[in-house]
Image (cartoon, rainbow, N blue to C red):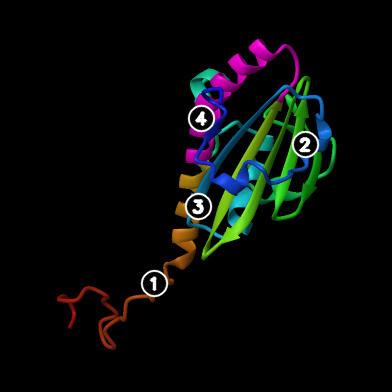
Amino acid sequence: MTPGLTWGVRPGERTTPLPCDGVLPSAGVRADRAISIAAPPSIVFGWLCQLRVAPYSYDSLDNLGRRSPRRRDPELTRLAVGQRFMTIFVLRSFLDGRQITLQSKGVAVTYAIRPEGEGSRLHARVLFAGPRLLAQALALGDLLMMRKQLLTLKSLAETEADHRRIPALTPARSHPRTGSTHPRRGW
């Protein structure tokens, strides 16, 4: 197997059919990357939709030095085929909460989410068309960028899930006469 074609993938995931397989059936190189995320699929999907505005990888390289947003914009979950993602991709298909499939010239990618315990499993497959040697070189570079992207999305999704799990703090009780909430003063 060519180095750089897999990262984090379990044996069965490499053979799982994904929508990008039909978008670029003549692709010479296929790369699979996957990661487990301690967040529900709905949160992970919301972060995938953020790829409409930023790549969430090495921002100095692929986002002109601008930091990818660290807060989700709920409006970005309103998807329609033909929308732009990461500037160079076009949305080819999606299943709300489950997958997005993107295409650019000579490249197709599916990000598929499935539940895994109380969290999610995110599997990205990238297909590269063109001369095999060039496609393999692109796949190796993509490994570095997508690994960072998946780790960033994992971190953001898990942080959001953790914040949702924290119960709301109850307001401090105030002293009936003084109104003070300080534990020593006014009590």
User: How far separated are the C-alphas under marks 4 and 2?
Assistant: 32 Å
- Kind of residue at badge 3: Ile
- Residue 38 vertical placement versus 9 (above, below): below
Please identify the residue farthest to the front as the structure is shown: 1
| Residue 21 - label | 2
Q: Nearer the viewer, mark 1 or mark 3?
A: 3
- Label located before the other in sequence (4 or 1): 4
Identify the residue at horizontal 55%, vertical 42% (top origin): 34
- Kind of residue at badge 2: Asp
Q: Nearer the viewer, mark 3 or mark 2?
A: 2
Compared across the picture, whether 159 is left or right of 133 comes to left
Q: Secondary structure at mark 1?
A: loop
Residue indicated by mark 3: 37
Q: Marks 1 and 4: in contact by CB < 8 Å?
A: no
Quarter of the image where the N terminus is located: top right
Q: Is residue 135 magenta?
A: yes
